[in-house]
Every structure is written in structure tokens, then in C-alpha cells.
Image: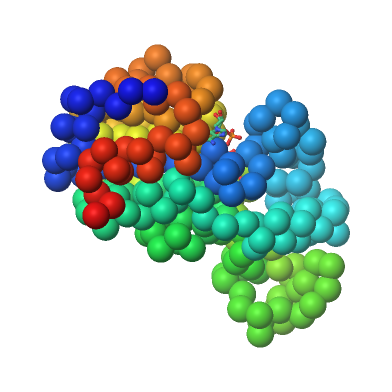
């Protein structure tokens, strides 16, 4: 994999960059992606049975247990070289990171990420949607909200739900204003996250894709870096001289 000199020259400048991250960013941390043929979460489970509000109402115990399993897996995971490289980059240049990942690993690597699909660690009240602290919760499977007795639910965006307004606003603004958009570790299949690349391209940005596999937007990429994020991002940051 070659890092083109004109790509490095572009990123050496101080113009704003948008990084749109997906599950592939955390793959090297041992967090399963969604759509890998054998190991992806959606190869083993049906999203409509686990990741919708209707599924939770239908079978709260199964859905809650699935999230407990994923939370435990994520708590044991550590940020990898790709998360650390993004944090380093962000310290040197105006880089907005929009992550579809709910694992919080970018924040644990010291980075600042717009969590487009929420955060799995957080609990919300199912009825009132407000954030619940541990003191607001009565233990159970699933736990319930102490104030209104509704179920607690994980603070992630389920299929059919809207992206948190603030995250959508900030992400769209970053897409409209960026000079380069870097898509890393996402299949680009899920709307509206995938539309951020189109927004950036319409506004004149260059497009870099970091992904070992082709995606529906690969043909639009000005630069395709076809390898793992944990390999590409540290090399990129080193070539730019940002880790001194
Ligand atoms: P996917 O599982 O759809 O795609 C993961 C992408 O990462 C694939 O294109 C892989 O080729 C790529 N990949 C795998 N290993 C990689 C590595 N080491 N480095 C770089 N890329 C790698 O995951 P997302 O695109 O994140 O939504 O999925 C988008 C959304 O769909 C998720 O946020 C989730 C899911 O349903 C919600 O939970 C709302």
C-alpha cells in the first residue's frame, strides 16, 4: 500500500478533515463488525430481533441480555493503533471524527468523537428517553427507571430511530466544511451516516477510503487505502510527521 505524495501534501495542510468511522476501526480491538460474512454480528443475529424498539417491547429479556453480552465484550476491549493514531492526528490538525461505533473506544483513546449512533454504556429511559444514572435504575433483567417504572434501554440508535439531533447537526456541518473526508472501516450501507460522504463530495472535498474490502462508494474515492485501519492510520500519521 502506497501513500501518494499528493495525499500527504493535502493532509499536511491545515484545512479541516472529516473522519467517518465504522466497525472496522474497532475490529483490531476484537469488537466484531456487523456485516462480515462469518463473524459479523448480523451474520449470527437478526437486527430486527435485537436492534429495534419493537424487538425490545416484544422480548425485553433477550434484547437486554444481548446488550449485556456486548457491553462486557467492549469493556474488556482496548483501543487499538488506529484509535490512537486518530487521537494523535486530532491533536495536530482540525479533524472531526464522526463514529458510528457505540463502543466508546475513540474516547478511551483520548479522542473527541461525535457518537452518531450513541454509546452502548449509557442507559436511557425507554419512555422518556432521558439519560439514567446508576441511581436512577432499579436492577432487573431488564432494569427499570426508578422514576416512571419504564424499562431502561441502551443508549444506542436502533433501526428506525433518528440520529441524535446535535450529532446530526455537527456531523453535517463538518461534512459541508471539510477539505478531505476520510471513510474508515465502514461498509457505507447505513443511512444517514453514509450520506455524509456525499455531502462532503458535493461541497468539493477529496475522498479517502480506508478499507480492505470494496464498498458501494469505493469507486468515488480519490485515494483508496486497501488495508486495515490499524495498519494504515499509524503509517499515515507517521508519514505526516504528526507523532513527534
Ligand atoms: P459493517 O460491519 O457494516 O462494516 C464494517 C466494514 O469494516 C466493512 O466494510 C469491512 O470491510 C471493514 N473492515 C473490517 N476490518 C477492518 C479493518 N481492520 N480496518 C478497516 N476496515 C475494516 O459496519 P458499519 O459500517 O460500522 O448501526 O455498520 C454501520 C452500522 O450498521 C453500525 O453502526 C450499526 C450497524 O447496524 C447501529 O447500530 C445503528
Q: Is residue 44 above or below residue 72?
A: above
> Residue at left 71%, top 68%?
152
Q: Quadrant of residue 112?
A: bottom left
> Quick check: can you spot residue 116?
no
Q: Out of 79 and 42, give the one closest to the viewer.
A: 79
Name, please, the residue furthest toward the top. Answer: 219
Give the position of the N terminus as an image quadrant. top left
In the visual, does 224 lie left or right of 185? left
Residue 202 placement (x, y as % from top left): 26, 26
**What residue sits 60% from the left and 66% below the top?**
122
Q: Is residue 200 above or below residue 139?
A: above
In the image, 53: left or right of 215?
right
Residue in the picture at 36% in, 18% down: 220
Nearer to me, 4 or 175: 4
Tell me if residue 9 can be seen: yes
Q: In what quadrant does ligand 1 lie?
A: top right
- Residue at image point 50% right, 19% down: 214
Q: Nearer the viewer, residue 201 or 151?
A: 201
Q: State which quarter of the image contains the C terminus.
A: bottom left
Number of callouts: 0
In this picture, residue 122 sits left or right of residue 114 = right
Q: Image height check: is 233 above or below 197?
A: below
| Farthest bottom residue in view | 135
The image quarter in which residue 218 lies: top left
Spot occupied by residue 213 in the image (x, y as percentages of width and height):
53, 22
Relative to 188, is 172 on the left or the right? Answer: left
From the viewer's side, name the closer residue of 177 and 166: 177
Rendering coords of residue 239 (x, y %) = 26, 38
Residue 40 placed where, x, y %?
Answer: 70, 35
- Quick check: 62 above or below 143? above
User: Tell me, what colour scheme is on the image?
Assistant: rainbow
Amino acid at each position: 500500500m502506497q501513500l501518494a505524495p499528493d495525499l500527504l501534501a493535502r493532509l499536511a495542510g491545515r484545512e479541516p478533515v472529516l473522519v467517518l468511522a465504522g466497525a472496522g476501526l474497532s475490529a483490531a480491538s476484537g469488537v466484531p463488525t456487523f456485516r462480515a460474512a462469518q463473524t459479523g454480528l448480523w451474520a449470527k443475529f437478526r437486527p430486527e430481533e435485537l436492534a429495534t424498539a419493537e424487538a425490545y417491547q416484544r422480548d425485553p429479556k433477550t434484547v437486554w441480555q444481548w446488550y449485556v453480552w456486548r457491553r462486557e465484550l467492549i469493556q474488556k476491549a482496548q483501543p487499538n493503533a488506529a484509535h490512537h493514531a486518530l487521537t494523535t492526528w486530532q491533536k495536530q490538525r482540525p479533524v472531526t471524527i464522526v463514529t458510528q461505533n457505540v463502543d466508546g473506544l475513540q474516547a478511551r483513546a483520548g479522542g473527541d468523537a461525535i457518537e452518531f449512533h450513541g454509546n452502548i454504556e449509557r442507559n436511557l429511559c425507554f419512555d422518556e428517553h432521558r439519560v439514567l444514572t446508576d441511581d436512577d435504575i432499579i436492577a432487573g433483567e431488564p432494569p427499570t427507571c426508578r422514576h416512571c417504572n419504564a424499562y431502561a434501554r441502551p443508549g444506542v440508535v436502533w433501526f428506525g430511530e433518528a440520529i441524535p439531533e446535535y450529532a446530526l447537526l455537527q456531523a453535517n456541518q463538518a461534512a459541508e466544511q471539510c477539505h478531505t473526508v476520510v471513510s474508515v472501516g465502514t461498509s457505507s450501507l447505513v443511512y444517514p451516516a453514509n450520506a455524509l460522504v456525499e455531502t462532503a463530495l458535493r461541497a468539493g472535498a477529496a475522498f479517502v477510503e480506508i478499507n480492505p474490502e470494496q464498498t458501494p462508494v469505493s469507486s468515488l474515492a480519490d485515494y483508496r487505502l486497501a488495508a486495515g485501519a490499524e495498519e494504515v492510520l499509524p503509517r499515515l500519521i507517521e508519514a505526516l510527521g504528526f507523532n513527534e
